[in-house]
Image (spheres, helix red, strand yellow):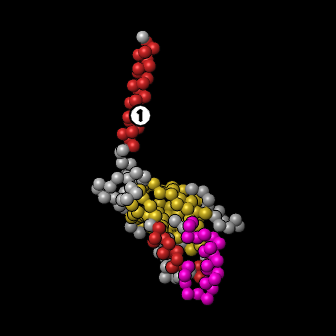
């Protein structure tokens, strides 16, 4: 009799746990924090291993850190705010990525995190870039209602990279080789 009660109790707890897991899967993710996981790729083994990250809100630095290249980093962002991350390193072009964490009142978020990896552009290579575009963010990340998650706006990034490297220089072949060799479009944001 005790064995039957124990078995019944265990079965009840198991079912209770299963129901809880199923119901939890239908709940929207808590979006009080939006988590950014990033990685700055080291493209040259001889270069210094560190770069500076700055998190901007309303054009003011609200967080900054020194991170090692090829090591992941994380920022937690509040919802319904625009942020920008700036990556700087001596000898490289500063890189900007913008994050729009705005959500509608009824938006359901299935994943409140976003992961990316990118690489910095050597200052020597920047002379081949479109000077009008170099100061714009390389990527924009925002909520996609169809997929219920935060995503990079791929069309923006592709157009940005394409425009950045399609300058009217005499050395366009060098630029094309750089883009192809480094697979820049697939790595940046």
Instruction: Tell me what residue is drawn at x 47 percent, y 57 percent.
Output: 114
Quickly name the residue at label 1: 18
Q: x%, y% of residue 92?
A: 60, 73
Horizontal arrangement in the rendering, residue 5 relative to residue 51 (left or right) = left
Q: In the rendered structure, does residue 80 fall within the stretch colored magenta? A: no
Q: x%, y% of residue 44?
A: 68, 67
Decide: is 187 above or below 22.
below
Question: Can residue 122 be seen in this snapshot?
Answer: no
Instruction: Tell me what residue is drawn at x 58 percent, y 63 percent.
Output: 40
Instruction: Tell me what residue is drawn at x 61 percent, y 77 percent.
Output: 123
Q: In the rendered structure, does residue 183 fall within the stretch colored magenta? A: yes
Q: Nearer the viewer, residue 33 or 146?
A: 146
Q: Could you tell me which quadrant the N terminus lies in? A: top left
Question: Can residue 182 be seen in this snapshot?
Answer: yes
Judged from the image, the secondary structure of the residue bearing numbered disc 1 is helix
Q: Residue furthest right?
A: 46
Decide: is 110 above or below 170.
above
For label 1, the crowd category at 10 Å Cα-Cα, with few meaning under 14, some 14 to 19 and many 20 or more, is: few
Horizontal arrangement in the rendering, residue 39 relative to residue 114 (left or right) = right
Q: Which stretch appears magenta?
A: 165-187
Q: x%, y% of residue 178?
A: 63, 76
Q: x%, y% of residue 61?
A: 45, 65
Q: Nearer the viewer, residue 43 or 68?
A: 43
Instruction: Tell me what residue is drawn at x 45 percent, y 71 percent.
Output: 156
**Number of on-image labels:** 1
């Amino acid at each position: 009799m005790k064995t039957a009660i124990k078995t019944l109790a265990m079965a009840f707890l198991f079912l209770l746990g299963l129901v809880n897991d199923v119901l939890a899967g239908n709940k929207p993710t808590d979006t009080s924090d939006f988590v950014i996981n990033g990685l700055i790729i080291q493209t040259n083994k001889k270069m210094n291993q560190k770069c500076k990250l700055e998190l901007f809100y309303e054009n003011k630095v609200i967080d900054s850190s020194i991170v090692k290249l090829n090591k992941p980093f994380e920022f937690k962002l509040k919802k319904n705010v625009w942020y920008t991350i700036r990556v700087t390193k001596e000898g490289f072009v500063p890189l900007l990525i913008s994050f729009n964490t705005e959500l509608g009142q009824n938006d359901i978020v299935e994943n409140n995190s976003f992961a990316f990896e990118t690489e910095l552009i050597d200052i020597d290579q920047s002379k081949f870039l479109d000077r009008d575009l170099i100061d714009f963010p390389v990527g924009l990340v925002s909520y996609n209602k169809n997929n219920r998650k935060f995503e990079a706006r791929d069309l923006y990034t592709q157009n940005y990279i394409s425009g950045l490297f399609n300058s009217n220089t005499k050395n366009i072949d060098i630029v094309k080789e750089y883009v192809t060799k480094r697979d820049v479009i697939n790595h940046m944001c």
